[in-house]
Image (cartoon, rainbow, N blue to C red):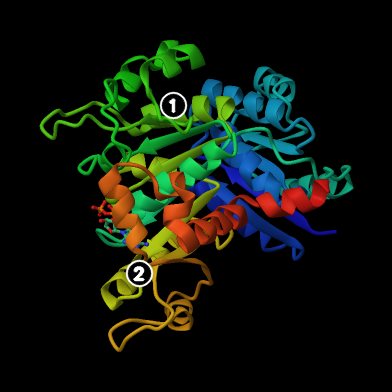
Amino acid sequence: MSISLLIASSDDHFREMVRENLLNVPTAKVIAEYQEVTANLYIRILQDLERNPEAALMIDLGGDTEASLKALERVTQAAPDLYVMASSFSAESEIVIAALRAGANDFLTQPMRRTDFRDSMARLEKAPRRAAVASSKLGKIYSFLGTKGGVGTTTLAVNFASVLAQRKQQTVLLDLDWTGNDVAMQLSAAPQYTLQEVGENLDRMDQALFEGFVTRDPLGFFLVGPPDSLDARAHFTEPMFREFATFLVEKYESIVVDAGRSLIDEVVLGSLQTSSTVFLVVTQDFPAIRNAQRYVAALMRMGFNQDQLKVVVNHYQKRHGPNTASLEQIQQTLNQPVFYGIPDSPAVVAAINRGRPFVADRQAAGDLDRIFRAFVDKATGAKIAEAKSA
Ligand SMILES: Nc1ncnc2c1ncn2[C@@H]1O[C@H](COP(=O)(O)OP(=O)(O)OP(=O)(O)O)[C@@H](O)[C@H]1O
Ligand SMILES: [Mg+2]
């Protein structure tokens, strides 16, 4: 029987050692590695379990043992029948008992001996398999990441959130493009409160407080972004984002992020890492595609896989000229399928001038509206779900 492992450890050596040991187990593979064992580890694990329900978790309790045990507890609460192997340098009974109470099925002392590792894999193979569970109740984060300025990242994020809200999904739209703040502009919103206030109030954050101070778009989604003033240096850090994201996925069905295009922004990276899908927005011109290649390479190095990364071609024109690429050329260059093409349409600029999403006026947007909704269907699996329930 094959073994699929998720490895959680802040220690490079630990993860490497597990990988090395696995080489001796021909049927085993690593599905995901998490470099942090923090309170919101469970979000990423649930997302990965959706794709690999049979996977087991190897978690390192070294580092901050107390925090790791808490993280483990949240994981096993969220996924009660996940098989968990915990590991620590200390085999003191207190730690072992705490690990078992937190939901671990097995315990391995470090440094791990090959025979111990093999035996633990044998126990795992004998353990009952986790049945594929219905998809988790946690909300999904969809991030839109531009590979160049002006490719339409903000436009796509705004309209994506709008369609979800029109479908009565509980939706939050987050603007993490600190310099642009274009989401508010495209929606004619003038938010009074921003991510600054979110950061300041995290320790008492609840749904009533959140909805009380963020802006609600007429379509029904909530919107929060950076302060409008460029010289206001708002304090919103990556750990704050993680805590905020945990709140959001517990309370809302969909979180849509305008991630801008900075891969060196820690908050943006945090959002990409908690995303179930990252839409990489490109256009058919060569500079955008070349940049997309760099983005794909960097994201792959960070551990994203093809399931999570979706290339969207905006301003798509079927009849492309000599200075632009066809979809086939884009797929070949990126070694990634193109997930969707969103046509170039004058309706987009008209909508931005009106200060409303183009999907808010279905007639004016015509074909663009229809194609965009089909894109949302494909991205959220809406049509599949409908077919299943039919
Ligand atoms: N499919 C489209 N058809 C026609 N125009 C479009 C399309 N998508 C976006 N645009 C136009 O392109 C311009 C840039 O769009 P947008 O601000 O969404 O891009 P961005 O990638 O977020 O830019 P920035 O790098 O400034 O954040 C806007 O004027 C918008 O109207
Ligand atoms: Mg933008």
The residue nearer to you, when weighing 250 against 351, is: 351
Q: Is residue 116 left or right of residue 89?
A: right
Q: Is residue 178 left or right of residue 109?
A: left
In the rendering, at what x and y percent does residue 374 appear?
Answer: 58, 58
For residue 357, which numbered disc appears in the image? none
Which is more N-terminal, label 2 or label 1?
1
Q: Amino acid at mark 2?
A: Thr
Q: Is residue 244 left or right of residue 283?
A: right
The residue nearer to you, when weighing 1 against 274, is: 274
Q: Which residue carries the number 1 mark?
A: 244
Q: Residue at 74% of width from left, 48% of height from top?
A: 385
In the rendering, at what x and y percent does residue 40 appear?
Answer: 53, 31
Tell me the quarter of the picture where residue 197 sits.
top left
Mark 1 touching mark 2, by CB under 8 A? no
Determine whether the residue tagged by mark 1 lies in a helix, strand or loop: helix
Let me know if residue 108 appears in the view. Answer: no
Quote the CA–CA distance across marks 1 and 2: 32 Å
Q: Which residue carries the number 2 mark?
A: 283
The residue nearer to you, when weighing 125 against 268, is: 268
Q: Is residue 138 left or right of residue 283?
A: right
| Quarter of the picture holding the N terminus | bottom right
Tell me the quarter of the picture where residue 132 sits.
top right
Q: Amino acid at mark 1?
A: Phe
Q: Residue at 54% of width from left, 41% of height from top?
A: 164
